[in-house]
Amino acid sequence: MTYTRPDIELWLTGYLRGKFPHCTVTNKEPPDLGRLLPLTKPLIVVRDDSGPRLDFMLFQNAVGVSVLAGTKANDKPANDLAREVAAVLFDDGITGIEQSPVTRVEWDGCNGPYAVDESSDVARRYMTVEYITAAVGY
């Protein structure tokens, strides 16, 4: 049997879609973001930054998440949503969700959300989360 790293990006985008149905959740930021402004729905972008294999069955996964909403002058929607997203992603309960590949949340890898400069007129908040995930067998 071969064991591989789970697709944490795919799993998290599906999980966040269920938690935030009023948002667009994706793993790719639209290349034409500026033309889509103002956003009709907040945007959550999940990016897997990978990490080392810890042993035969466990992997470390660093994940970056951007939340885009509101405008630079009205950043409250982005701030509020980003705090909610962080609360969901940083919660140890994520390990007990059906089909979750997450076995542990690494608290010292949970950072943000914090403001990020954005050239377009949208408020961007960014956070990182680190998980230990279980291998998938094939």
Image (cartoon, helix red, strand yellow):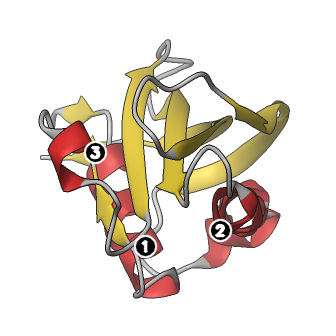
Q: Secondary structure at mark 3?
A: loop
Q: Farthest right residue?
A: 108
Numbered tag placed on residue 94 in the rendering: 2
Q: Nearer the viewer, mark 1 or mark 3?
A: 1
The residue carrying mark 3 is 7
Q: Horizontal and vertical percent for residue 62? A: 55, 27
Q: Nearer the viewer, mark 2 or mark 1?
A: 1
Residue found 56% across the figure and 18% down from its top: 54
Q: Nearer the viewer, residue 53 or 39?
A: 39
Dots 2 and 1: beta carbons under 8 Å? yes
* Label 1 Cα crowd, 10 Å radius (few <14 / some 14-19 / many 20+): some
**Distance Cα–Cα, label 3 vs label 2:** 15 Å
* Label 2 Cα crowd, 10 Å radius (few <14 / some 14-19 / many 20+): some
Q: Farthest front residue?
A: 73
Q: Quadrant of residue 129?
A: top right
Q: Horizontal and vertical percent for residue 114? A: 76, 34
Q: Secondary structure at mark 2?
A: helix
Numbered tag placed on residue 15 in the rendering: 1
**Distance Cα–Cα, label 1 vs label 3:** 12 Å
